[in-house]
Amino acid sequence: MPDTESPSPPEIDDAPTGATPADAVVHPPGAIKRSLRDKQPDDGTYRNPLKAGGRFTSKGSNAAGTLGCLLWDKNNHEVGFALTAQHVVQPPDIKKVERNKTKLGQPKGTDGSTGYGNDIIGVWVEGQKVLNAAGTFADRDEAIVKLAPGMKWAPEIVGLGAISGMHALTPDETKSGTYPVHKRGALSDVTGGVISTYITNAATEPDPDKQHSLLVVTSNPDSNGQPGVFATEGDSGSAIVNDANEVVALLHHVAEDTGLVHCTPIEQILGRFAKKGFNLEVAHPVPGHPPIFTVPGGAKIALPPEVVAQFAADPGMRKDFRGEADQAPAGRSWFTDVPPPAGTFDRVRDDLSRSAGGRLLVAFMERHGEELMRLPHQDQRFRLAWHRGGGSMITQLLLRMLLHPEQTLPATLTGVPVMTCVDRILAEVRRCASPAALADLARVRAAIPDLAGLTYQGILDALADGSDRREGAGH
């Protein structure tokens, strides 16, 4: 049941552009009684480190579901996997999926090659959707996505908190029809219900590969005491948890006529993946281990000594920084204080629009921003020049300045004046940009002030001063 809404692009230069946070409230599992009818958000929030319960989609798709929970390799807990429904990986507008190639992202599924942003978290490695004999709904519908090298992730579900593992339900536990469960869906947030039915063919089917079980969940009443709704389109792939915050099943189907939710027991899903060579467990916090896990093998960017010195002088920067020592993660945002609050980039646009130079920058990005964001993905030489020339560093520091106005840009990067770095990158832009972008680029460069040592307000003031000087010279 994909959700076809598309939220705002989550990143510019691998850093989020803003979305409404949904991580602030953790509901005690035993107290969750809400029905979908009490609240219907559309969760387009970007999360770094990655957590489950948010919007999840294949690159190039206009549909979306939910990232259910995080799994790990039994032999290496740092190696993480995202569990969801197979039809979230391959919705109707994705004709073909390939193991180890089909990319998925959170929340939008873009890697920058078709527009702004980079929120790809990994690639599909295994999964299947199998319909029942009548062809009316799926007997099973599950998929795993292997997280990309360097990805930071936490074994949590938004709104439900840390997951404590898994629990294999038995028919006896659910025969009363009142076994309490909860889920966090990208569209419907946290809802509560009960397992009303446990159907299995294990007693009559000798072939383990053909055995399957189905859990049916009905919702708790809504806040007005009326029949509730546990899930809806966009919630496919949600993990079903019990009062102990143990994963018991995966949601894959909502019956349109009855609102009943069909789920597959988690132990059967993990058993099928084990037969495919994936020995996985539901991830959970480990005593003595930091709350965040990191997939090995991620690329790093060496930080210039000037940036390292800024971190050393500013404990807040070091606390927020996601890198290690004098290196930063390539391809992801660097600071924990992003995405910025909703409206931040509208404020920046308003601030820039107060000067002629700022208005020129805004117009340039509106006309050519999409093209420029594609360049690192289309041209390897540009990508190398961008990273080696300090493009990522300058951009990440500028983004942090939006919420920390006292922060300044360093005057140099590895001894090179910061504006020399900017000009080297612009030289590469001139080499591969379109004629339309080139026609505007010279005017934009003339409007950019010397950024060395400036705060956010200092940059705005310098843009305005430069505009005044140019207008005065024109008289």
Image: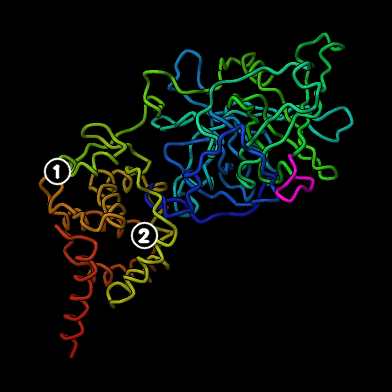
Side of 284 where 296 appears, left or right: left
- Under circle 1, the secondary element is helix
- Name the spot of residue 338 as percent of width and height, x first: 37, 48
* Residue at the spot of label 2: 433
Front-most of residues 434 and 308: 308
**Amino acid carrying mark 1 in the image:** Ala
Label annotation for residue 313: 1
Neighbour tally class for label 1: few under 14, some 14-19, many 20 plus, Cα within 10 Å: few
Is residue 6 magenta-colored?
no
Up/down of 307 relative to 72, above or below: below
- Name the spot of residue 145 as percent of width and height, x first: 55, 30
Q: Which residues are the magenta region?
A: 220-228
**Quadrant (top left/top right/bottom left/bottom right) for the C terminus:** bottom left
Going 85% across and 45% down the picture, which residue do you hit? 257
Front-most of residues 308 and 288: 288
Is residue 221 magenta-colored?
yes
Side of 40 where 157 appears, left or right: left
The outermost residue toward the top is 206
Whichever of labels 1 and 2 marks the residue nearer the N terminus, that label is: 1
Going 19% across and 81% down the picture, which residue do you hit? 468
Question: Image quarter for residue 306?
Answer: top left
- Name the spot of residue 113 as percent of width and height, x first: 47, 49
Side of 71 where 455 appears, left or right: left
Q: CA distance from mark 1 to mark 2?
A: 38 Å
- Name the spot of residue 105 as percent of width and height, x first: 52, 41
